[in-house]
Amino acid sequence: MTDLLAVPESRAFPLRRLLQPLLAARHVTLHTHVQADGDGTGSQAAVAAWLEGRGIRVSVVNPTPFPDSLRFVLHRQDLVADLGTPEADAALDDADLHLVLDTSEPGRIGGLAQRLDPARTLVVDHHPAGREVVGEVAVQDPSAAATGEMVYDLITLAGDPVPRASALGAYVALVSDTGSFRYGNTTPRVLAVAAELMTLGIDPEVVYRRLFATAPRRRLELLREALATLDSDEDGRIGWMVVPHEVAARLGATGEDFDGLSEHVRSVEGTEVALLFRETKPGETKISLRSNGAADVNAIAREFGGGGHVKAAGALVHEPAETLVPRVVEAVARALRG
Ligand SMILES: [Mn+2]
């Protein structure tokens, strides 16, 4: 069997270039996109434990609060300072290097976009490159299943053993972005990396329980409300659910409560594109788009000012769901007609 753990050369070359400034830094701040997910935070945790082991100071500064449900992935809670706090300002001022993980787009990092000097900012991301990139040294590789896979590569290219805390972060990243090793991005290499991480002490069942098997009651109530709105176009190729702002507000639902909701829509037989419309506030709607392969939802999301991957994308639109839903459904129908 070929060495599945070997880093593909097309990825190794740019990652080695990024290693030079990274390992020469004194204090690195780590960043990910708004509404951090398991890949963004897992990648941050993996890099944090690794760089600290090398004697480099690390801070985690995200544009929106670090999700409580993902705190377990960090080896130290005091690494985190939310943007806008004095601690975050101090870390950003003191750092000589910034590393943005799991996005490269200024529009995805909220208020951080104004705080990061591109000349001192590196990017590691697995999304297709957008128009603007936040850092001057950016490694963007859509062939990676997760940013966490690239972080694993970065550590091994440095010639370092993968610390156990880094293994946990990388594993959480892989589980999150592959839908627990079920989506099409689950390559033989992903499973080989996951196997390697297991040998470093990761217990898949423990991670599963922390990520999925416990949820606040409001999350199931949100699912019940969302399922009540389940709808589809005439031939059932496009399905969607809508969560109005008043529902989310009544339940006290946070961003992470919505993770995976669109999978319920996608699971309906015959569905080719699944949509979730979530009003984040009155007059503002977040669209999540999931494709079973027939349509490029990244292209559709870009029509509405967003982006993402071919099979999973999103957009934030300043418009109530009521008028937005028919416009997006029509755009998807057009894409499916090809
Ligand atoms: Mn990701």
Image (tube, helix red, strand yellow):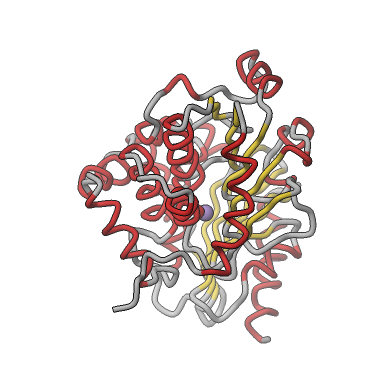
Q: Residue furthest top?
A: 86
114 horizontally vs 274: left or right: right
Q: Residue furthest bottom?
A: 338
> Is residue 70 placed above or below 8 in the rendered structure?
above
123 horizontally vs 254: left or right: right
Whether residue 285 is visible here, answered yes or no, is yes
Q: Quadrant of the C terminus?
A: bottom right
Say which of 136 and 182 sits in front: 136
Say which of 274 and 309 sits in front: 309
Where residue 3 sits, quadrant-wise, is: bottom left
> Is residue 218 placed above or below 317 in the rendered structure?
above
Where residue 185 sits, quadrant-wise, is: bottom left
Q: Quadrant of the N terminus?
A: bottom left
Whether residue 261 is visible here, answered yes or no, is no
Total numbered circles? 0
40 horizontally vs 305: left or right: left
Q: Position of residue 118 (x, y in %)?
A: 78, 41
Q: Position of residue 309 (x, y in %)?
A: 59, 65
Q: Position of residue 65 (x, y in %)?
A: 55, 29
- Which residue is pictured at 59% across the width and 51% down the height? 124
- Which residue is pictured at 42% across the width and 55% down the height? 227
> Is residue 238 placed above or below 305 in the rendered structure?
below
Say which of 79 and 219 sits in front: 79
Q: Position of residue 326 (x, y in %)?
A: 68, 65
Say which of 11 and 259 sits in front: 11
- Which residue is pictured at 37% across the width and 68% down the height? 189
